Image (tube, helix red, strand yellow):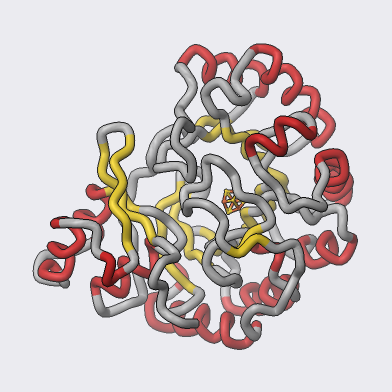
């Protein structure tokens, strides 16, 4: 399947059926911590990258094949910033006609200043925007946004949307060592968070290989300080639980997940049942396999596999 992937275990959401409505690494940020690597298609223009019928047909096929008891939520996320896709409300409406499971949007929140984005996103049940910066300088250094985006406009858009939205806002803050974990930075972030007044705040840390070297997990004392200050939920560990894929071919299944969600070696071992594609898996395990556009990264004592843009198959 091209757009539907998972089921992926999520620290915040349980078993998440993912929908990616945009091409690989299409985003208006290039965050230094991005687990998908640097942004290769930097854009701030919304587009109908794929027909909504094509995306919804895949969701329908998945549910027919596996039933909706195999997942807890449907999450629009994927390979970059999903609000660059329009019309998102068509996707929301279509998914809601197929399952009663909550519909979640994971977004950087950068386009919420746009009233048409606000309207389309209002159809979701849970919206999870990101806030890692407190001013223009920290925004440019951590999120590295598309040129025209400016911090105050983005932040005010998130505040405005949060006030109007009838569903839940779960804000996520990515804490990075020596970037936004000082006492001063945490206090400035706290002021911004209070203005958004989200239903929940989650602290995340870079547990998967980041786009840039030197992006590190803060010391535990800093993470604890942020928890106390923000009154947060914690997600600073890798999730537990098994992946599930609609693909019959093991290698294809791994590729479809890795495109959106880097997997650790343990994830891969748990994902594959004996006999299902173990020979192909050896190719990945033995070295970085250029053929499959997968790179092998070592990070915090673990091996991760993630998708790379080079030699990507044509759309
Ligand atoms: S973390 Fe999200 S917002 Fe940041 S570059 Fe990656 S996909 Fe874009």
Task: State the residue in front, 83 or 138.
Answer: 138
Task: State the residue in front, 87 or 282.
Answer: 282
- Rendering coords of residue 170 (x, y %): 66, 43
- The residue located at (40%, 34%) in the rendering is 237
Left or right: where does residue 78 sit relative to residue 201? left
Image quadrant holding the N terminus, namely bottom left
Residue 74 drawn above or below residue 202: below
- Rendering coords of residue 241 (x, y %): 33, 50
- Rendering coords of residue 199 (x, y %): 72, 38
Can residue 78 be seen here? The reply is no
- Rendering coords of residue 208 (x, y %): 40, 42
- The residue located at (14%, 57%) in the rendering is 286
Residue 10 drawn above or below residue 54: above
Left or right: where does residue 176 sit relative to residue 280? right
Total numbered badges shown on the rendered structure: 0
Residue 36 drawn above or below residue 238: below
């Amino acid at each position: 399947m091209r757009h539907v992937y998972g089921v992926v275990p999520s620290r915040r959401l349980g078993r998440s059926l993912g929908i990616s409505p945009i091409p690989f690494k299409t985003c208006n940020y290039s965050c230094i911590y991005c687990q998908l690597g640097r942004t290769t298609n930097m854009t701030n223009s919304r587009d109908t990258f794929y027909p909504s019928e094509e995306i919804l047909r895949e969701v329908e096929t998945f549910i027919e094949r596996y039933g909706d008891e195999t997942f807890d939520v449907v999450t629009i996320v994927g390979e970059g910033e999903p609000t660059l896709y329009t019309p998102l409300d068509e996707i929301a409406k279509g998914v809601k006609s197929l399952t009663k499971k909550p519909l979640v949007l994971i977004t950087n929140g950068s386009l919420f200043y746009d009233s048409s984005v606000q309207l389309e996103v209002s159809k979701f049940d849970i919206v999870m925007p990101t806030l890692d910066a407190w001013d223009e300088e920290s925004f440019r250094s951590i999120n590295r946004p598309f040129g025209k985006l400016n911090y105050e406009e983005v932040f005010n858009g998130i505040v405005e949307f949060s006030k109007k939205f009838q569903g839940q806002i779960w804000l996520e803050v990515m804490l990075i060592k020596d970037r936004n974990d000082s006492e001063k930075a945490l206090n400035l972030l706290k002021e911004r968070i209070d203005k958004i007044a989200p239903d929940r705040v989650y602290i995340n840390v870079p547990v998967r290989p980041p786009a840039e070297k030197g992006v590190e997990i803060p010391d535990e004392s800093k993470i604890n300080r942020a928890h106390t200050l923000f009154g947060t939920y914690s997600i600073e560990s890798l999730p537990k639980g098994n992946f599930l894929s609609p693909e019959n071919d093991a290698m294809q299944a791994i590729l479809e997940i890795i495109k959106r969600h880097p997997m650790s070696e343990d994830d891969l071992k748990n994902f594959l049942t004996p006999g299902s594609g173990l020979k192909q898996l050896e190719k990945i395990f033995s070295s970085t396999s250029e053929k499959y556009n997968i790179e092998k990264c070592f990070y915090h004592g673990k091996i991760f596999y993630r998708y790379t843009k080079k030699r990507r198959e044509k759309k």
